[in-house]
Image: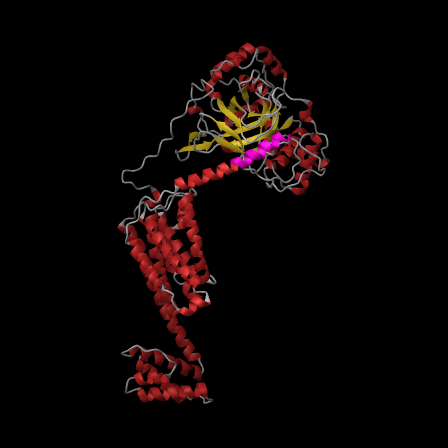
Amino acid sequence: MIFIEAYQAAGGSTIPRGPFALTAAAAFFFYSLLGHASSLLVRGRAASFFPLLPAALLLFLLKRADAPLFLSAATASAVAAKLFIDLFPHIDKVLLYGVFLLDTAAAFLYFGRHVLSGAYPSDKLLFVSLVTLTLASVQELLFEKPLLRSRGVAFPFFYFALLGILVAMFPMRQKPIDWTPVAEAGGRVLHRAQDMVDSAAYYLSSMWGGSYTAGYSSLEVSGGRIEGSGRTEILLETSEKPFHEYKDEETSKDMRVRRTLRLAGGAGANMTRLVSFLRFLHAGNVDRKYAALFSKLSEVDVEYAYLNTPDLIAPVGALFIDDGSKDAGGAVYGGSSPENAVHKKGYRFTARYLDLDYGSPYLAALIRKAGDAERDDSLSYEEACRYFKELYGVKLGSILTEDAYEETAEGSYSAADLDTDGVSDALRELAGQLTSDVPGEYDKCRVIEGYLRQYPYRTDAVGGHDPHSTMGTAAGMADIADRFLFETGAGYCVHYTSSMVMLLRLSGIPARAVSGYLYVFPFDKADAYEVSGDCAHIWPEAYIRGVGWVPFEPTGAYRTAEEYTWHRKPATARNDAQSSYAPPIPSPVPVPDVPDDGKASGDTSVMTFGQAMRIALPTVLSVLITLAALLLGTLAAARLRYLRATPEKKLAMDVDRIKKSIRRQSAEDFADRGLLSDYTARAPEALRPDVQRVFDTYYKVVYGSSAVSASDNELAASVRKQLQ
């Protein structure tokens, strides 16, 4: 039952807990009886395998009859449990200590997954069973102590079983004790204490002029061993939902996928990216409806928590930054803000940015087409303003002047983005092997990305051969990439990004590394979202002709853009696209309809009487055949052993059978003291002299050196047959 709850809590298929628990208990009891019957006929562990024959037939019949899944699952679980108990070595110790593991699992499901709360009768059965077994196990552990064992005050197990039955008779409280206020109060105390410690470290570092340690860093990283940081470094606030909604084409179910946000360290808004992307859409004749499939304007409030950096960390594709200062927006990507040398805790700004779904197949098709062909992407400022208004319903002139547009339109990439200083012959050869036969810049990027994602992720890594190599220079990235690709074979984002940047440059594609954060929103909407140091990330960007800078994800531990795509389709695209920076909140996801009878479909359906009989009758017949085969086989084996035995063995076997017959025919039960005279006194009076002679012969053989004659065996066999 606990494992079923854990399976369902992890997102598995729904299995009715009550019917499953009762079916599993009945099946276990049935196979225990069958195993006990087998043990009367077959000795040793072989008796545990005979119940598998009817069990296998039952599972086959259940599958063939398309029976509910919980019946097959319960039957298989019962058989597996029975075999485990019969065959596992030291099973007594396993069961003794396993009870406490089950207690831990039940507590986790109750407090962590909010199941086993008493809403079902099976919850009560499980609770009573666990309490009974736990009390019995605790007593067993205590009575392993010699002092307590010598006093002999242990309660028998049926005492605890009776106690459990009495407890089960009382109604179970449907509404459990609400420990939430206590847990929340404790959490607030711990959070406040941690916040005080972090604040003290932060302000002391600032007073002494030092840098505050955080997950975010510049490109001056070497790729050495790193440790995670769960400290909150950025707070995000947004009115938008933290997920995208779509309808699954195969199941027609309403689905959700979490939003992602890349925060890049720079100096403000990225006008170069905006202008390049606007020209790219215009050259591809993208209209408002098609652009809404993979792009939208969004807004987010960003607040620095435990950060101390000159960099302005804003969403990739930021169009406007408003922090209340005079010259907040319009800064070019990269570097630090000269007006505000250092941004500290409490620094806050609003960022309006162009959110792009790089995993959209429609955007990928446009990028591939733009990179493969030379197109006229000229676009005047007046045309750009009209086109931007048409696509997103916002005036471009409010965020970008004509002079700034002309200056930005001339920017693309620099010579540093093609610098391959320090690359090895092996790295150059690998780039040729990967991309020499691949047409198109975008596809070359995807091939390199896919190749690097095969490498294992590990934070306990090393940098380049030169300990001073960093991602700040081409030679440093080449050194880090060379050692990662051809020696260590494992690393984290620094190693993957260095490798992809250098492989792209060797393939003739401008590339650069970007440092910042990759944040994946939760499914639950919150007032503020905490971006911790564990979200700090470095990723590569490639400059695709006719498109601009495009991010990629070669780090294997992170999901690609395709896994976070919005799943928007042309048929469901909104004609009004985006009319403001803060898009309206979509309506809630509709709840699937439930049938009127309250039953779920599929595996939880009820079997008909005919189906049950077609399964039960062959199963009962197989049990009878199995027991009959065991009985006949046991008799045949016993007869064969008797015929092939020595005279002494035959006499011993006859004596054993005579004793059993006398015990069975005795009017009163008696304890076997090991004395044959006890059996002689209870034998039928007419046979008592012959029984005495057989026992005397047996004593002479066991304690003396007398041989057994043929007449002795004949007499013993005759007495045995008369007593049967």
Main SS, magenta region, reads: helix
The C terminus, quarter of image: bottom left
- How is the rendered protein coloured? secondary structure
Would you say residue 633 sits in the magenta stretch? no
**Viewer-nearest residue: 494 or 36:** 494
Residue 204, picture quadrant: top right
Question: Can residue 359 be seen from the camera position used here?
Answer: no
Q: Determine the residue located farthest toward the top in the rendered image.
A: 382
Percent across and percent down for residue 63 are: 37, 50
Percent across and percent down for residue 258 are: 47, 32
Question: Can residue 132 be seen from the camera position used here?
Answer: yes
Count of numbered circles in the view: 0
**Magenta span of residues:** 195-209
**Viewer-nearest residue: 265 or 500:** 265
Would you say residue 204 sits in the magenta stretch? yes
Residue 248, picture quadrant: top left
Residue at image position (34%, 78%) is 671
Percent across and percent down for residue 365 are: 53, 25
**Viewer-nearest residue: 532 or 330:** 532
**Viewer-nearest residue: 167 or 405:** 167
Percent across and percent down for residue 131 are: 37, 55
